[in-house]
C-alpha cells in the first residue's frame, strides 16, 4: 500500500531516526509499503522511513544496473536497516539530486565517491559492502534522512537563499 510522503517542514524530517531493535511483522509491512510508495506512486530510486512519517533507521532503494542490451535499468528493490558508514573517500563527486520530500527541487550535491557500509537486511542478515558511484550516492542520500539531514543542508548559503521562496511554498502547502 502506498503511503503519503512527508514534505519539507514536517519535524520528522529533522529528527535522528531510532535504531530498529527487532525485525517484526510491522517492520516488514512498513518496508513493503515503502517499496510500493517508492516504485508505484513516485517512481523513485530511494525512500527513507522518515519520509513516510516513521522515525526509524530504515530505507529502501533500487540500484542502477546495466541490462543485457547495455541499457541502464533499476534493480529489484532492497531494504536497508540500521546502516553504519565508515571510510569515506577523500575524493568527492558532485551530481544533481532531487528528493521526494522536496518536490520539484534539484540541487548539486558533493559526496564522497566511495564509502563502506554495514547494514541489516529484512531477513536479519548483516551485510558489509564497499559502495561507489550511483549506489554510494543513493545510500548516502537516504542515510542523510535517517540523521535529519536534507539535500538543502549540503549546498552553499547562496544557493539555499535562492531556494527559500520555493521552500516556503512547500511548507505552506503541507
Image: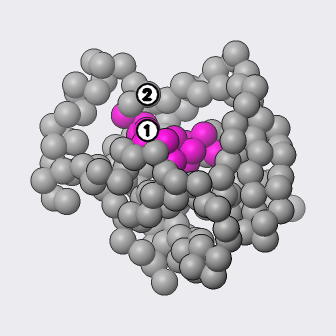
Is residue 103 something one can see in this rendering? no
Distance from label 2 to label 1 (Cα)?
8 Å
Side of 173 where 152 appears, left or right: right
Residue at mark 2: 154
Q: Position of residue 40 (x, y in %)?
A: 51, 75
Query: How many other residues sit within 10 Å of disc 2, few (<14), some (14-19) or many (≥20)?
Result: some
Kindly identify which numbered label has been placed on residue 149: 1
Of the two numbered discs 2 and 1 in the rendering, the one whose residue sits closer to the viewer: 1
Decide: marks 2, 1 in contact (CB < 8 A)? yes
* Residue 62 painted magenta: no
| Residue nearest the observer in this picture, 117 or 133 | 117
Side of 56 where 132 appears, left or right: right
Magenta-colored span: 139-152
Is residue 113 something one can see in this rendering? yes
| Residue nearest the observer in this picture, 67 or 80 | 80
* Marks 2 and 1, the one that precedes in the sequence: 1
Please tell me which residue is depicted at 70% across the width and 63% down the height of the picture: 78
Q: Which residue is farthest left?
A: 172
Query: How many other residues sit within 10 Å of disc 1, few (<14), some (14-19) or many (≥20)?
Result: some
Q: Position of residue 80 (x, y in %)?
A: 68, 58
Amino acid at each position: 500500500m502506498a503511503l503519503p510522503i512527508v514534505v519539507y517542514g514536517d519535524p520528522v524530517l529533522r529528527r535522528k531516526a531510532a535504531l530498529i531493535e527487532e525485525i517484526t511483522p510491522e517492520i516488514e509491512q512498513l518496508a513493503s509499503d515503502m517499496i510500493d510508495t517508492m516504485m508505484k506512486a513516485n517512481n523513485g530510486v530511494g525512500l527513507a522511513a522518515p519520509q513516510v512519517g516513521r522515525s526509524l533507521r530504515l530505507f529502501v532503494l533500487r540500484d542502477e544496473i546495466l541490462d543485457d542490451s547495455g541499457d541502464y535499468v533499476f534493480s529489484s528493490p532492497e531494504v536497508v536497516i540500521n546502516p553504519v558508514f565508515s571510510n569515506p573517500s577523500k575524493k568527492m563527486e558532485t551530481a544533481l539530486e532531487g528528493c521526494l520530500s522536496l518536490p520539484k527541487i534539484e540541487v548539486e550535491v558533493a559526496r564522497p565517491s566511495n564509502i563502506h557500509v554495514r547494514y541489516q537486511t529484512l531477513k536479519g542478515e548483516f551485510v558489509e559492502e564497499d559502495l561507489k558511484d550511483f549506489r554510494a550516492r543513493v545510500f548516502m542520500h537516504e542515510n542523510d534522512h535517517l540523521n535529519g539531514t536534507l539535500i538543502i543542508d549540503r549546498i552553499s548559503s547562496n544557493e539555499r537563499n535562492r531556494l527559500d521562496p520555493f521552500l516556503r511554498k512547500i511548507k505552506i502547502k503541507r
